[in-house]
Amino acid sequence: MTAATLTTALGPADVALHRLRWWLLSLLLLALGLLPLWLPLPEPQGGLTVTQATHRPPGTPLSGTVALPHRWYGFVAIEGEVGEYEVAFDLPAAPATEPLYLYVPLLSQNVSVWLQDHELFNTETRSQQLGLSSGITMMTQLPESQLRAGRNVLLLRLKTRGVMPGYLSQVHVGTLQQMATPYRSRVFVFEHLRLMALACQLLLATAVLVIWLYRPREPFFGWLAALLTISLLAYSGQFADFHPPLATALPWTYILGTAASFMPLMLLLIINGTPVPRWLQLMPMLVPGIPVLLAAIGMAPPQVLAVWVSAPLNIVGMLSALAAAGWIALVRRRSEAYLLLIPLLMSVGAVVHDLLSVAGVIDDPIQVLIYYRPLELLGLTILLMRRFGQSLRSLDRANIHLREQLEQREAELSQLHAEERQQAARQVRGEERRRLTVDLHDGLSGHLASIIALAERERVEGIERTARDALDDLRVVIHSLSVGDRELGLALATYRDRLASQLKRVGIALDWSHVRLPDVSNVTPTQALNVLRILQEAITNARKHGPATHITVRGEAGAGGGALLTVENDGEPFAQSDDVVGVGAGLVNMRRRAAQLGGSLTVEPLTAGTRVTLRLPTRLPDLPGGTDERQEKRL
């Protein structure tokens, strides 16, 4: 993730915290890399310190006095050569109150110790690192039977292999309390720490290899697994004591191990998002292949090729990776590059130190490159865990996004399903209405029209009037079937047009206006029929019991909200005592229908005439058996 992408994805506080974490990790790696400089190993406090010895180099009977620490240089045979040191120390005449110990802080590579021709110690019986990274410590008890007052002489036979110089530090003689702490600290550094690094690298290599097996298309994990696996060859000297022939193969293992020298550069290119060139992918085969070819044709022994061919190629690879890490971290500002920049910088310094030590330029026999390998492992582990954490975070975000998308799709599908059901119900209702309308119009309506025609021809007014009333009533029912929600005004207008011609034939004037009627919702065919029936009954009563010559119908908003439909006539004022049975039944039905509409009905006499007022809510209630929409859903 680039700095620009990070800035857009996170807020300023998050960006600052992110950068702070990376700086703390970088400082941690730097502090661990500089640990040998600010945390020296402890030295013995007290006892005897021998600073001179008589040295006889390998292959010569000549000897001379040398100052300790001392080393000799030059390439030796792979099977090893032995140089001898005679170390003398004086003891007082009084016997020691505590057992005395011989402590040698550092020697390279194997040693056998003799006191008065009695062998005390031999490192050949112990497992230790061999090869370019060798360096061991030793401590053994001096037997009281072999010690004497005055001068005591120790013989140290030091054996070295390959290109490593022979080295012997100052020698200390003292009690266990004086020597234990320095000895244990050096055992931890020279033996345990190497084993810990090996175990960590084995564990990390296994983990990365498993990840790569599940993510084979990820080149980062593939090259990282190859780097960790091939670099394990540097630890092959650790097992020379278990399989002695392996000691002769140490130069070959170093040559083959240089196959990993250009892999950090590949990882950095992948981090930067740059494709790895084909020639660079071939370097793991070319770098060890050149020394192997030269050794096969007999140009030089493998230990010489390991130093003068493989080592320079290894340094070139590390310098290339260091330059790439610096450019990616400092110029491209990629945070992951910092995790490899500091370990690579330390490793390059360690390689320079080790080469100068082999060449004899500096007097330090410890090969420190292997101690910076845990630092590289730490950087790679943080890098790997960061990649793994990013993958998990991306997976979590993808899961959340998919869950949200799924919930949204489910809601949309539910809505579509509900709409489809409603549409299907409306379609069924519409088809049923059309069927009923056609059947009523073509069947009963036709018969009533025939009855009216026959009654007119025969001049039978009672039959004609009854038939016309039946036909008008049928038309009201048929029209109510096609009324939809919020279409009460349209139903009223249609009924008004049909009613006007009927009243005109009998000489009754009609004044109808419902433009001020508020919008009424939740209108169903049944409810529309109830409203029309109430108006029909009010107008019929005005015609029959008025008798009225003028009828006024008004639709407007109520004073307290709601809708009002008022029917006034100029006939006789309404009187409850004069109400006949038929009119009483009609009034009861009108009030029942008004109650079903959630409204009320009032009938009041006027000075000249009667007023019927129907009060309706702006949203009609559902019918007791369920609305027509619910009935449609059941269909």
Image: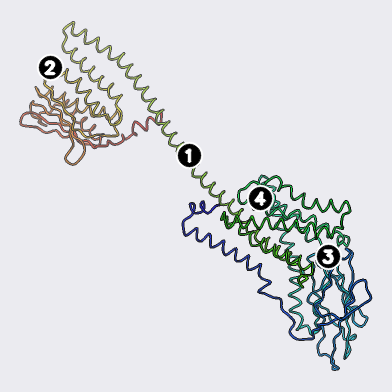
Q: Earlier in the sequence, mark 4 or mark 2?
A: 4
Amino acid type indicated by mark 2: Val
Please tell me whether mark 1 sits on a helix, a strand or a loop. helix
Labelled pair 3, 4 in contact (Cβ < 8 Å): no
Between marks 4 and 2, how big is the CA–CA gap?
99 Å
- Of circles 2 and 3, which is in front? 3
The one nearer the camera, 431 or 262, is 262
Amino acid type indicated by mark 4: Phe
Please tell me whether mark 2 sits on a helix, a strand or a loop. loop
Amino acid type indicated by mark 3: Val
Q: Earlier in the sequence, mark 1 or mark 4?
A: 4
Residue under label 3, please give it. Answer: 163
Q: Earlier in the sequence, mark 3 or mark 1?
A: 3
Please tell me whether mark 3 sits on a helix, a strand or a loop. loop
- Of circles 2 and 1, which is in front? 1
Between marks 3 and 1, how big is the CA–CA gap?
73 Å
Between marks 2 and 3, how big is the CA–CA gap?
134 Å
Between marks 2 and 1, how big is the CA–CA gap?
62 Å
Quarter of the view holding residue 315: bottom right
The one nearer the camera, 282 or 97, is 282
The location of residue 575, given as percent across then percent down, is 9, 31
Residue under label 4, please give it. Answer: 220
The location of residue 103, given as percent across then percent down, is 80, 79
- How dense is the environment of label 1, judged by Cα within 10 Å: few (below 14), some, or many (20 and up)? few
The residue located at (73%, 84%) in the rendering is 45
Residue under label 1, please give it. Answer: 410
The location of residue 603, given as percent across then percent down, is 14, 33
Please tell me whether mark 4 sits on a helix, a strand or a loop. helix
Q: Earlier in the sequence, mark 3 or mark 4?
A: 3
- How dense is the environment of label 2, judged by Cα within 10 Å: few (below 14), some, or many (20 and up)? few
Can you tell which mark lies on residue 506? Answer: 2
298 sits left or right of 504 in the view:
right
